[in-house]
Amino acid sequence: SNIETKKSIQESGEVILVESIGDLLSLNQNGYSNVLVTFGLDVSNKLACTIMSLNPSKVIISLNNDRQSKENRGLEASVVNYLRFLNFFEKEKLCICLPTENDFGDMSQEDFKIWSKKLSSIDQKSQIEKILSIVKNISKPIPKSLYKNIKILKNE
């Protein structure tokens, strides 16, 4: 329920953003109730406002991992959403940690352990380097309004 989700986000200080209800249910079944659904690749303004009002210490962007595709749309969208969230949160509060499979519904319990380990070992500096390399080769143009955030990352 909404109340449980809100409580879980406040208690853990973290929110995990996923693309679909299926992802949310898989995470819930594996012990994560601090999950919000983007219903696609873009974080809506309403959802962004909700997240800001919850003031988490960490926003974990976990859209689908379309690594089998020519372009990993989930990864690219995660990068754009990360850049957008830089308008509202310090970079220390943001991270991208995609599912180990295409989405959380495709993951086994073992995969969840691997994902959890990956999440806890994210290195900020290497994540920013990776984001900057993705920005260079992204297939859809990045909104001009986010260029200043790319510059902020480059100056680290």
Image (cartoon, rainbow, N blue to C red):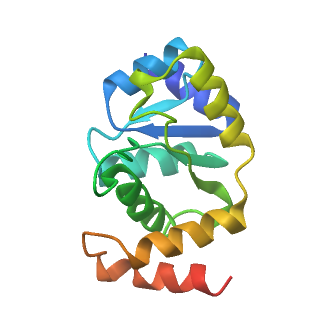
For the point 42% across and 66% down, the residue is 84
- Provide residue 120's location: percent of width, then percent of height: 73, 41
For the point 59% across and 54% down, the residue is 95
Left or right position of 62 against 64 = right
- Provide residue 129's location: percent of width, then percent of height: 61, 72
Quarter of the rendering occupied by the N terminus: top left
- Provide residue 18's location: percent of width, then percent of height: 41, 37
For the question of whether residue 90 can be seen, the reply is no
For the point 51% across and 24% down, the residue is 5
Residue 107 vs residue 46, the one in the foreground: 107
- Provide residue 2's location: percent of width, then percent of height: 43, 22
* Residue 115 drawn above or below residue 57: above
Left or right position of 137 against 133 = left
Left or right position of 88 against 116 = left
Q: Quadrant of residue 15?
A: top right
Q: Quadrant of residue 125?
A: bottom right
For the point 31% across and 83% down, the residue is 144
